[in-house]
Image (cartoon, grey):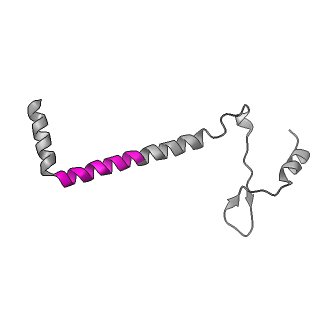
Amino acid sequence: MKHHLKITISNLKRTALTSFFNVIGLTSAFAAFVLIMLYVWNEYHFDQYHEHTGEIYRLEYKSPKREKASVFMLGPTGETLVNELSE
């Protein structure tokens, strides 16, 4: 076991620059993975604290002038939906 450790240290000293870049690459890849997983976890569990989670909907408005839909609505949209739609 001691012999393997000595060989490993010797190899690391001999290829110090390559080893440094390998460790930096591995560290940055792991950090990116953790950040991506935190983002995915947050998106997956968004609004899960509500009692009626299955009844939450997202309204989108698609303008004829734009390709993308918008989630920003005008002020009276909520009142109109409550008054005109039945539960």
Q: What's the residue at 24%, 51% (across, down)?
A: 20
Q: What's the residue at 14%, 40% (across, down)?
A: 8
In the rendered structure, does residue 35 fall within the stretch colored magenta? no
Which quadrant, please, contains the N terminus? top left
Q: What's the residue at 88%, 41% (across, down)?
A: 86
Residue most toward the bottom? Answer: 65
* Left or right: 43 in relation to 21: right
Please provide the residue range marked out in magenta.
16-31
Can you give x and y, in whole percent of width and height, for residue 49 in the image? 67, 33
In the rendered structure, does residue 20 fall within the stretch colored magenta? yes
Can you give x and y, in whole percent of width and height, for residue 64 in the image? 75, 67
Given residues 78 and 28, the one toward you in this image is 28
Which quadrant, please, contains the C terminus? top right
* Left or right: 41 in relation to 76: left
In the rendered image, the vertical position of residue 69 relative to residue 57, given as above or below: below
* Quadrant housing residue 53: top right
Q: Please name the predominant secondary structure of the magenta segment in the image.
A: helix
Given residues 22 and 52, the one toward you in this image is 22
